[in-house]
Image: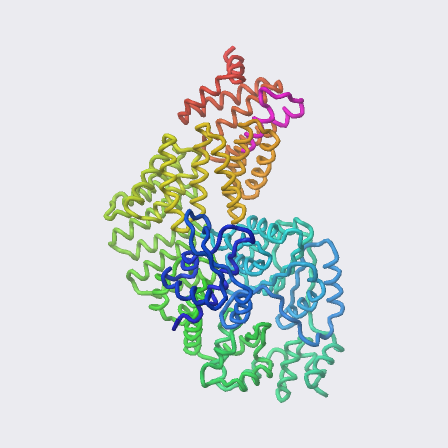
Amino acid sequence: MGGQSFLPTEILDYVETHAPAEGSPYGVSQRELAKSLGYHPCSMSRPLQELVEDGLLSCRRGPVRDGLRKHLVYRVTEQGRTRLQRETKRVPLLAGAIPPPPNPFIGRKEELERLADFARGQAAVMIIDGAPGMGKTALLSRHLRTFRRGRVPFWFTVRPASSPRQFVTALSHAFSLLGAPQLAYYSQLQRAPSPTEVADLVQRAIGAHELIAVVDDWQMADTNLRKFLGALVADLAKFHRHQFYLVGQDVPDLGESRLEHERLTVGGLDRSSAHDLTDRKGGLAERFESVYQSTLGSPLLLQLAVSNPEIEADAATLPRRVVERLPMEDLRTLLLVALSNEPIPASLLTSSDLLSSARLAEIHRMGVLQRTQQGRFEILQVVRSAILNRVSQADEREAHLRLADFYSGSHRPEAIRERFLHLVNGEDWKSASQLLTQQERTLFALGFSETLRAGLRHLSLALPRGPAKVRALYAEATLLRHHSDYAEAISTLRRAISEAGDDGKVTCEGLLQMVDLYARLRQVDGAAQALADAERIGAPTRRLSVFFLLSRARLLEAQGHTQLARPRYQEAFETARRFKITDLALESVAAWSRLEELESAADVALRIVSDALPEARQAGRVDIAFNLRLVRARTYFRTGQIELAQDEMQSVRSEAESMGYLNQLTYSLHGLAAAAFQSERWTEGFSYAKQACSLAERLGNDLVLGHTLALICAAEARPTGEHSTQQLREAVVHGERSVEVLARLPPSEALAIAYLYLAQAQFQVGEVKPAVQSHNTALRLCDALSLGWLRQVALTDVGAKIHEVASA
């Protein structure tokens, strides 16, 4: 396979990580592999065939996830797993394994007792802080050798480019052995991961097990990752049986979570332990006391002093003095380790004639390099700083370019992102720009990180005026949008428009993107102005003409004119589909499906959904496919086909739950509750409704939460039921909360229905005046939103009695 020798390993890794649960009818297909790894589907045929022939993969014909037809699907065999474990030593892969402690481990009796007390106690979080080189990681790995038994361990070391998406991907790798694929599916979603959703998936993945998780080098995390990890730990800690260790040079800010936590600050070794450590390494003789005092008992500096006995220096100057003894040829090679965001294999360091295997072993003996559990090398911060102070900027640029070449040997998203960052730091602007153009979606696959944002900003500033600079700015705006930083995305788009000059096409595209961003910020005037500015330019291409349709629909929805927006979304979808503009077609149908109902006749709505589903599936937009099926279920429900609606929602519920699509799961539970209440299966309906409310509240989905509370209110106060006073009062409470939640959103049919249900409950409990007020509010909403059919419903049964009282 020539230059693609790394591909078999990546295929095995992906199939193993993303394998459906045992007994599932689905499997991983060639198309899914190609899409995720960044290859053309045809180029996957030969590697897959060879892996099957070698017994590393099994192959059968079966259904693919969210697909209609059967394809060849693959699973990793036991032989393949053995090969994967061996081969991943050569390819940069995420790992969640606990590193081994030093052997022998010396001292730290008091600290180990503190950690043991914590492990046996009730607190959820242990914060371990201290200066670099004090042995925090070694201490914790020694502690976990005993206390990880019977628990699910996970260790994540933060790197400068780490992001929430990368953390979730690491979790999916670590949990793949549990046979729980939901996290792997979730890590592939285009949107940023939610701490609440990830916490729910983790809890379901580990089941009755207890999680023991470590986040090491916390000080390297950017603000976004710190916020995500803090919220995730807070959510998981609610289960009172998981434990978390946050390790770093500073104390994490846990915000307003008020988590019960303990803190252990790690200092140097005591004199006795320090003497024992240095003796085992060769001893310091009469120099021990002065070295111990100057190093403050730091295990790292003590070992560095023992390994370099001819150097006399204090703690502040020892790393620099050791590095000064190394020739520049060695330092230029060691720069690869110093500048890398992760440990790197020895093969990269010895691939040139500048550093032999023997010399590498000698440098490791000196304490300059540290060897990881996987046999790779890293440099601790104090030594890294000393190396960087000795080399030139030209040396650093050359090292970055060598690292970029190293990472070109893998198509994993992590490797592509590292390659891009090293190309930027190596100032190879042309190659970085080309990689951004070819792999933008893959670069963003791991989500937002400040390091990637800085790389894009650096590239956009360095590139000369022209199309490449504009593309870099658009990519930066896209990253900011994924991060929900809409204001910064708008500012970046304005820069792109300025750089585009007289290019009306680029300017128009940017303005129309700003319409969506202003709408998300609920700045309706800004959205209207951006659309007006774009309309003055016009639509010179088919793509822009469709984008105008979509943007006008978005503006109408932002203004609260949902009934006017629906046909515009429909028109944008159908036009984009006719012109084969897939991304805008899917954006249109996604926005359309968010609205509460389809205004078209049922047969038209069902036809549109049926036509759009294959396109969404082929494009890999499983989220949009779920939304379309929920629209179809609602259409069935509104036309009285309750059984069909329930079957569709049960199917969505099952698949969304197994794949970790929690928002769509919430809508399906809400729909199942409505169908059960409609069929007078009250117990089943209340069960679904409570699950929907719980998920909706956690996800911040006010529409589903408010509407489901209204359904509970209506069920508790149903006219034909036998009610206790307490049950009716609970109905009023649920109804009042329903209108409170839905009032946060623009006026809608759901709010009008909630007021009707609340009025009925209030009337039955004897609160006549509030019932009249709620009923009149519902009627006003019906008139304002042109809901004639709902107004007629409001004037029947209990509503008619309330109206009589109001008219008297």
Return the x and y of residue 793 as percentages of the image width and height.
47, 20
Q: Is 718 within the magenta?
A: yes
Q: Is residue 635 above or below residue 789?
A: below
Residues 96 and 773: in front is 96
Return the x and y of residue 337 as percentages of the image width and height.
51, 75
Residue interval drawn in magenta: 708-731
Q: Is residue 240 above or below residue 57?
A: above
Most frequent secondary structure within the magenta stretch:
helix
Q: Is residue 504 left or right of residue 405?
A: left
Return the x and y of residue 304 as percentages of the image width and height.
62, 81
Q: In this figure, which colouring scheme has been used for the structure?
A: rainbow
Spot the residue most to the top.
808
Residues 627 and 338: in front is 627
Return the x and y of residue 786 as percentages of the image width and height.
40, 25
Residue 542 seen in render: yes
Residue at (35%, 66%) from the top-left corner? 462
